[in-house]
Amino acid sequence: MRKLFFMHIGLAILAACSGSKSAPKPTPRPKPPVAQHTQPTPPVAPVSDRLSIPVKSDATNILWVDSDRLMPVLEEAQRLQKNVFVVFEASWCAPCKVMESEIFTQTPVYELYNRKFINFKTDFDSETGKTIAQIYEVEKLPTVLILNPQGVVLERYLGMATATRMQDMANKY
């Protein structure tokens, strides 16, 4: 076996030194084939499908997290690495009702907010709403905030926002 090995090496050296073109050249080993995906990648589920807290589902509006407390929403935002869109509203607030019925129902607005944010709405007059409003220094309605997952205000808008303003605000984040 050793003799055969040395004879093979000797022939290879002889062929290399003689410049003979008829000497066989070693062929490189073929690389193993790279596994290719045969199935298309499934689409990513919308944020509302990945939330571990319930969402009030409405196909023609912003999908609001069904929670009166902000802390679980922020925890979920941290888990999903999403910002939080917060709306402060009240039953007596006419501009809030206009935004709910005419702005948040516009397809470009709700599709953008449902894709980019976890959406949270709070009643300014409820106990938890008052507490959240006090923490974020909200005194007038409507007020909307965009919070990072740690609860820091990235954007604040006071008053009735147009659909264009809502889209511009969302596109910053």
Image: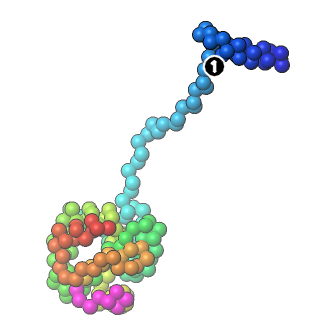
Q: Position of residue 166 (x, y in %)?
A: 22, 71
Category of crowding for the residue at label 1, using alpha-carbon neighbours closer than 10 angstroms: few (below 14), some (14–19), many (at least 20) = few
Quadrant location of the N terminus? top right
Q: Position of residue 133 (x, y in %)?
A: 33, 88
Above or below, 71 against 135 in this view is: above
Mark 1 is on which residue type?
Pro
Q: Is residue 38 magenta?
A: no
Identify the colour scheme used. rainbow
Drawn side of residue 82 relative to residue 90, left or right:
right
Q: Which residues are magenta?
A: 134-141
In-front residue for pair 142/101: 142
Residue at the outermost right position: 2
Quarter of the figure with residue 52:
bottom left
Above or below, 170 against 45 in this view is: below
Q: How many marks can you see?
A: 1
Quarter of the figure with residue 150:
bottom left
Dot 1 corresponds to which residue?
A: 26
Q: Main secondary structure of the magenta part?
A: loop
Residue at 35 percent of width and 79 percent of height: 153
Residue 18 visible in rendering: yes
Residue at 17 percent of width and 79 percent of height: 160
Drawn side of residue 44 relative to residue 62, left or right:
right
In-front residue for pair 118/3: 3
Residue at 37 percent of width and 89 percent of height: 135
Residue 57 visible in rendering: no
Q: Position of residue 124 (x, y in %)?
A: 29, 87
Quarter of the figure with residue 68:
bottom left
Q: Position of residue 138 (x, y in %)?
A: 29, 88
Residue at 38 percent of width and 50 percent of height: 43
In-front residue for pair 1/159: 1
Quadrant location of the C terminus? bottom left
